[in-house]
Amino acid sequence: MPTKATGSHPVSALVALVAGTVLSKYVWDLLPPIGTASQATLNVVNSSIISVPTNSEAAGALVIFIGVTVIWEVAHYIRAK
């Protein structure tokens, strides 16, 4: 399986990074509760684990990163099954 799945994970990370960066501002325009929850999560992480930016763009990017990665990996799992 590792030889079949080698390209999927790096491509997923790259797509999530680009999509998150480009689409982060739309999270606040279209989905304010999700953006607020993401920013609250970043505040908790900031206070306990590591220091990360807590502005609205970082919070929106986090939502897109997680969403794209989950969708990509589920689709890859279903296709590889």
Image: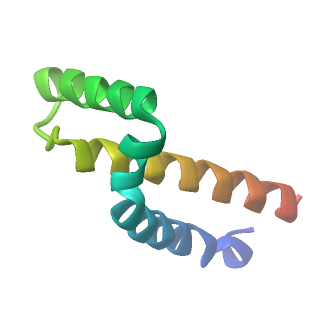
Q: Position of residue 13 (x, y in %)?
A: 47, 66
Query: Relative to the observer, which residue lies in front, 22 or 1?
Result: 22
In the figure, 61 relative to 16: above or below? above
Q: Residue at x 40, y 71 (%)?
A: 18
User: Looking at this rendering, what residue extends furthest in the right direction?
Assistant: 81
Q: Residue at x 30, y 25 (%)?
A: 41
Relative horizontal placement of residue 51, taking residue 22 as reference (left or right): left
User: Looking at this rendering, what residue extends furthest in the front direction?
Assistant: 29
Q: Residue at x 56, y 67 (%)?
A: 9
Relative horizontal placement of residue 61, taking residue 13 as reference (left or right): left
Q: How is the image coloured?
A: rainbow
Query: Relative to the observer, which residue lies in front, 60 or 77?
Result: 60
Q: How many marks?
A: 0
Quadrant (top left/top right/bottom left/bottom right) for the C terminus: bottom right
Q: Position of residue 50 (x, y in %)?
A: 14, 35
Q: Position of residue 72 (x, y in %)?
A: 65, 59
In the figure, 5 relative to 64: above or below? below
Query: Relative to the observer, which residue lies in front, 4 or 79?
Result: 79
Relative horizontal placement of residue 24, taking residue 72 as reference (left or right): left
Say which quarter of the image contains residue 52.
Answer: top left
Relative horizontal placement of residue 61, taking residue 43 as reference (left or right): right
Say which quarter of the image contains residue 53.
Answer: top left
Q: Residue at x 44, y 53 (%)?
A: 65
Quadrant (top left/top right/bottom left/bottom right) for the N terminus: bottom right
